[in-house]
Amino acid sequence: MQTHLRVARATDHLQVIAEMYQKGLGLDVLSHFEDHEGFDGILLGNEDMSYHFEFTHHHGHIVGKASTQDNLLVFYVPDKNEWDERCKQMLAAGFKQVNSYNPYWDKSGRTFEDVDGYRVVLQNSTWG
């Protein structure tokens, strides 16, 4: 057995967010649920990944925008052609390209913001 990471967060725009991350990052819908004790949710990922994302909406509650511009998911994509394609996918999925709050990420990457104000960095380098 291997460790698996779930990144979970609430949103006021469940379907929109799910579609953005699915199309922008090339993820599959792994599961979804409706009205589980007042929550709806969608889990995105790929079967071969050791992580997945869960987006939820709690009926009758407003989440609002990200609390800071430095809430980041960072993906290291070393191959330049693959990185270029992924950047195009992010824009086509509805993400907005923005300047990073921390200028470090703009040196070899691009930062994209979703409708909730959360950000994804595609870094054109290797990790480590």
Image (spheres, rainbow, N blue to C red):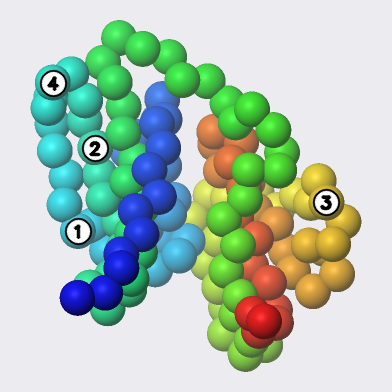
Mark 3 or 1 closer to N-term?
A: 1
According to the picture, the residue beneath numbered tag 2 turns out to be 41
Q: Residues within 10 Å of mark 4 (few under 14, many from 20)?
A: few
According to the picture, the residue beneath numbered tag 1 turns out to be 30
Where does residue 107 sit, x and y in percent of width and height? 85, 69
Looking at the picture, does residue 122 appear above or below residue 113? below
Is disc 2 in contact with disc 4, using a CB cutoff of under 8 Å?
no
Outermost residue on the top side: it is 60
Asked which secondary structure carries label 1, the reply is strand
Q: As drawn, is 32 to the left or to the right of 105?
A: left
Q: Amino acid at mark 3?
A: Asn
Q: Nearer the viewer, mark 3 or mark 2?
A: 3
Is disc 2 in contact with disc 1, using a CB cutoff of under 8 Å?
no
According to the picture, the residue beneath numbered tag 3 turns out to be 102
Estimate the spatial distance between the alpha carbons at disc 3 and disc 1, rounded to whole Å: 32 Å
Where does residue 20 sit, x and y in percent of width and height? 44, 50
Where does residue 108 sit, x and y in percent of width and height? 79, 74
Where does residue 15 sit, x and y in percent of width and height? 32, 38
Q: Nearer the viewer, mark 3 or mark 1?
A: 3
Q: Residues within 10 Å of mark 2 (few under 14, many from 20)?
A: many
Residue drawn at 24 percent across, 37 percent down: 41
According to the picture, the residue beneath numbered tag 4 turns out to be 37
Q: Could you say which quadrant of the image residue 55 lies in?
A: top left
Q: Residues within 10 Å of mark 3 (few under 14, many from 20)?
A: few
Residue drawn at 87 percent across, 56 percent down: 103
Is disc 3 in contact with disc 4, using a CB cutoff of under 8 Å?
no
Asked which secondary structure carries label 2, the reply is strand
Residue 40 seen: yes
Q: Nearer the viewer, mark 1 or mark 4?
A: 4
